[in-house]
Amino acid sequence: MARLVIVSNRVASPRERAAKAGGLAVALREALSQRGGLWFGWSGETQVDPPPPKVFRSGRVSYALQDLDPEDQRAHYAGYANGTLWPLCHYRLGLLSFRRADWEGYRRVNAHFARSLLPLLKPDDIVWVHDYHFIPLAAELRKLGFEGRIGYFHHIPWPTPEVFLSLPSHAALVRDISHYDLVGLQTEDDVRALLTYISSEARGWIAPGGGVGLKDRRFRVVAYPIGIDAEAFVKDARASVGKDEEKRLKESLAGRALAVGVDRLDYSKGLPSKFAAFGDFLARYPEHRSKMTMMQIAPLSRAEVTEYQALRRELEELAGAINGEYAEFDWVPLRYLNRPFQRATLAAIYRNARLGIVTPLRDGMNLVAKEYVAAQDPENPGVLVLSRFAGAADELTGALLVNPYDVEGMADAFHRAFTMPVEERRERWRTNMDKVETNTIHSWCEGFLADLSQAADHFG
Ligand code: GDG
């Protein structure tokens, strides 16, 4: 079997604590430790004139961490990746900023990464590049003469051509994409969006099965909906039963029902609308007051980007207003926590929550929705309230699907979920759990790598 090389912006090295790793990191660490290989990415450090990457080994996996020049790193990460591509792909054109200097910095960083990765590569390695920080990496590696198989997985949505065309560098970015052998997206809608752009704007041709011809390049665009390690999550959730932490949680609830949300503090996650919907729910369904509590876990994210600082202030104000208006001396309606928790703690909280509220305005997939389903007690499962604009909505058809722009509609869904009979809850949960158990992180990884291994010789 060919060696696997993974490239992603942050590398979840064994030195990083599990509690700090996000969805992407958790998924990849599991994938690579099964196969062995090399994980290459940014070290998290900046310095002027950065030296070659630091390489070390742990078990079957080598890690190579590259420092970056501080100004390049800013232009790449806070600039083009998170100030341009992130809002664009999440349909937030009002938040999009495009500066030529950022675009040039983004390309410079990709060229630098390609130069420092190349000496670590063997000709028959399979290289799997992750996410929007690295779209030009394959083109840069090809320029340096690497002819092996390179795949790309885009973890976030691919916008429709009408939205994508707002990006001044749209044509160059899709030319970059064409240097991969396989391009993986989360959903069929994402695939349709990219293929439509390629055929209508870039004058490429499309073959059945996602085959694409663009100028002299041949590649495939295919949907691989990402999953979770369902078995591990079920185990964690079961193991939490009766433990001290669960006891503390139950004591603090004093018999009240729990609704839970877990989202990075990010404007794509629709947190202000979720809070507004919770406020509306308490206003229009007063029978639930003092009978339930909502817990929103929202670890801080990208705190150096201005939009995220403004969002944090907005949420603090909204949470304060809800608690100020509805709290009793012995009841706080909304528990709002800005820090990460251990995975086992999350599993215990999910399992004890009658409602899981996942209402992003746009989301590539959303793993929290799947984790919440996996953690439930099959005899007495909770209800998932899920945004129709999360990739997960394609699979989790047993959820109560909501439009996150419809605040009152979401409040109605909370009421429906809290009053849903147990038979209906079981039936809906079974529908969701079948998907979560079938389409796991392992099958996702194997599916992508099997297709990439078989990718036709791109010069053929
Ligand atoms: C991107 C795409 C796509 C969160 N808080 C804590 C914690 N988490 C974990 C969750 C989950 C992960 O982080 C979040 O993953 P999501 O999928 O929900 O969202 P993004 O971070 O935006 O991920 C997304 C994903 O990539 C994978 O392709 O689904 O659409 O945006 O696993 O559990 N984990 C711990 N403590 C926390 O407090 N331990």
Image: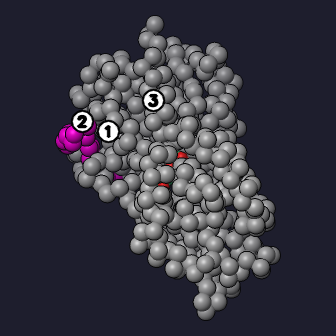
* Residue 411 in sight here: no
Circles 3 and 1: CB atoms closer than 8 Å: no
Relative vertical location of residue 136 with respect to residue 320 in this rendering, above or below: above
Name the N-terminal-most of marks 2 and 1. Answer: 1
Instruction: Sort mark 3 into few (<14), some (14-19) or many (20+) by Cα contacts within 10 Å.
Output: few
What residue is shown at x 71% (from left), y 75% (from top)? 279
- Outermost residue, front side: 379
Q: Residue furthest bottom?
A: 329
Q: Which residue is mark 3?
A: 446
Dot 1 falls on a residue whose secondary structure is: helix
Q: Give residue 85's position: percent from left, percent from top.
A: 54, 45
| Quadrant of the snapshot with the N terminus | top left
Q: Which residue position holds label 1?
A: 33
Residue receiving disc 2: 60
Helix, strand or loop: magenta stretch? strand
Distance between mark 2 and mark 1 Cα atoms: 7 Å
Instruction: Specify whether residue 183 is in view.
Output: yes
Residue contact between numbered discs 2 and 1, judged by CB atoms under 8 Å = yes
What amino acid type is highlighted by mark number 3?
Glu
Q: Secondary structure at mark 3?
A: helix
Q: Nearer the viewer, residue 197 or 294?
A: 294
Residue appearing at x 33%, y 46% in the figure: 11
**What's the amino acid at mark 2?**
Arg
Where are the magenta residues, as a range?
A: 52-71
- Toward the top, the furthest residue is 460
Q: Earlier in the sequence, mark 3 or mark 1?
A: 1
Label count reads 3
Spot occupied by residue 69 in the image (x, y as percentages of width and height): 29, 48
The image quarter containing residue 2 is top left
What distance separates the C-alpha of mark 3 from that of mark 1? Answer: 13 Å
